[in-house]
Amino acid sequence: MFGFSKIGTGTKGAQMARDEINAFLGSGTDYQGKLNFQGAVRIDGNFSGEVESEGTLVVGKDARVEGVLRIGQLVLSGKVTGEVYARDKAVLHKTANLQGNLVTPVLVVEEGAVLEGRVTMSSAGVEAVETVAEEIS
């Protein structure tokens, strides 16, 4: 019922498609705080706070997310404002709007997506970039 068949491409895309949705914040839902999860979570409402996971965060077309995201993979169709650290991959669909900084080794951007901020892509991995960023600030 909440599964999805096409999120990304290649091996990681196949893994993302197999991730079972563990939680779903539907439209009309407002949540503030810290979210930790395994597998995949889909947000279609409003979320403000921190997200930490090795799994996949799916942000729906009408969703609004604000805060710091430290996740395995991001699939964005809605709006995210803040800092995003996607350890494996970030996919921005044509309706995506990312306002803030993005750190990821793999970035897929569809025509029409909006990305305003700094993008850092490093083969050393997200953890190495986060460490350097913390030392600078």
Image: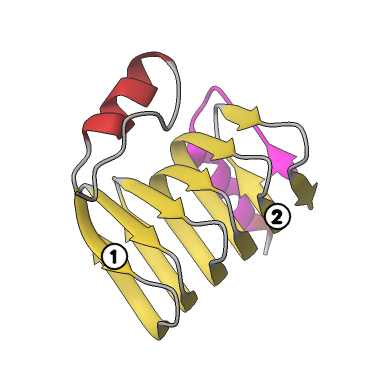
**Residue 128 x, y percent position in the rendering:** 50, 39
Q: Residues within 10 Å of mark 1 (few under 14, many from 20)?
A: some
Left/right placement of residue 3 relative to residue 76 reads left
Residue closest to the eye, 115 or 136: 115
Q: Name the residue located 72 percent from the left edge and 41 percent from the top edge.
A: 119
Q: Name the residue located 44 percent from the left edge and 82 percent from the top edge.
A: 28
In terms of image quadrants, where is residue 92? top right
Residue closest to the eye, 103 or 76: 76
Quadrant of the drawing holding the C terminus? bottom right
Q: CA distance from mark 1 to mark 2?
A: 20 Å
Whether residue 127 is visible, yes or no, is no
Whether residue 48 is visible, yes or no, is yes
Residue 14 has which mark? Answer: none
> As shown in the figure, which amino acid type bears the numbered disc 2?
Asn
> As shown in the figure, which amino acid type bears the numbered disc 1?
Phe
Classify 16 as above or below 20. above
Q: Which region of the structure is painted magenta?
A: 118-135
Q: Is residue 120 magenta?
A: yes
Residue at the spot of label 2:
97
Left/right placement of residue 124 relative to residue 113 reads left
Q: Name the residue located 57 percent from the left edge and 65 percent from the top edge.
A: 62
Residue at the spot of label 1:
24
In terms of image quadrants, where is residue 8? top left
Q: Secondary structure at mark 2?
A: strand
Q: Earlier in the sequence, mark 1 or mark 2?
A: 1
Q: Is residue 34 magenta?
A: no
